[in-house]
Image (cartoon, rainbow, N blue to C red):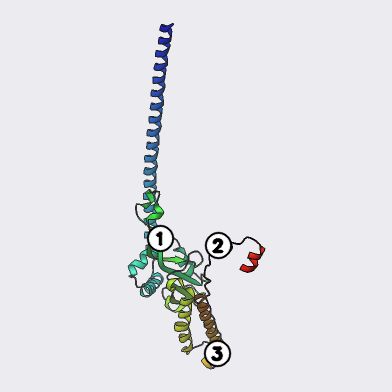
Amino acid sequence: TESKYHRRGENLKTGSTELGSAVTESSLTAVLSASTSVKKSIALSSESRKAVAKQAKVTEEERRAQIDGRHKYLISRLADGIDLSEQQVEEAIISDDKFQLIEQFFVPSGLKKLLFFYQDVLQQKSNASLRSDASMNSLPQKKLFITTGSTENFTGACAFFLRTSDEVITASNVSQKVNFGMFDCPNGNTLQGLEYLLSQIMIPALKSQQNWGAVKEGLKNSQIQDFLYAVDKFVGTLSSSRQNIEDKIQLTKVDIDIYVSNLQNPSDYITAG
């Protein structure tokens, strides 16, 4: 009997050892397989980024080849207004996802306006994409980009081009058919920037305007006077709105716990009231 139990114990030990060895080997295989998958994923991710970067470079060069006198006019105005070099502006434009808006602005009866924002945006560090805490590696940097004005918050400077005609914009007429302007948004205050643009730039320019097209009397015309009065009134409304926002009442936060913690019965509530 002892001999039988002894042999059975040896069998159990042998089976346990084989099972442990199998589990260890299986776990090791799983770890190696997972490690290999991660390496393949990183390699594929790296290859994908290289492919995307290569395609982006090809697109930029194609766009650079399309640049003509019209684009150069826009680039020169932007460089003067934002205090960037023309080369910096050109690089920003050809790498912009909304580059096609420029072409849509040039065509007959095209877009009435073309907007550019120059402001701080979050830019990721080059190695941030490989880390799980990539969001922590984002830093605000100044960037010039094309916008429709409806998808990004306006916090910096806005440069705008307005077309004065539905005619096709060409290299020979771009300076006559397109107006350029800028306004800033100091500390995120859009009303202040718009008020300054109208009161200090637009209205003085309008009041000094001598040629009003078909209106021969110019500033003496009653319609022109009504128009200028309406613009002045609008600027006054902007100013009032801005001041109301800046001087808005700030209610002090009150800790009511000290008042309600000792209320036990209706008479206490009456006294507190």
Q: CA distance from mark 3 to mark 1?
A: 46 Å
Which residue corresponds to the image point at 35% horizontal and 73% vertical from the top-left? 83
Quadrant (top left/top right/bottom left/bottom right) for the C terminus: bottom right
Residue at the location (38% across, 30% down)? 28
* Displayed quadrant of residue 43: top left
What amino acid is found at the position of numbered circle 2 in the picture? Asp
| CB contact under 8 Å: marks 2 and 1 | no
Q: Earlier in the sequence, mark 3 or mark 2?
A: 3
Which residue is nearer to you in this view: 137 or 141? 137
Residue that numbered label 2 is attached to: 257
Report how far apart the C-alphas of labels 2 and 1 lie in the structure: 42 Å
Q: Quadrant of residue 256?
A: bottom right
Residue 12, image quadrant? top left
What is the x, y in percent for residue 255? 53, 65
Residue 227 badge: none
Of residue 140 and residue 107, the one placed in the foreground of this image is 140
Q: Earlier in the sequence, mark 2 or mark 1?
A: 1
Q: Secondary structure at mark 3?
A: helix
Quadrant in which the N terminus appears: top left
* Whether residue 164 is situated above or below residue 154 in the rendered picture: below
Q: Nearer the viewer, residue 118 or 147?
A: 118
Residue matched to label 1 = 122
Disc 3 target residue: 225
Q: Residue at x 43, y 7 (%)?
A: 4
Residue 190 visible to the viewer? yes
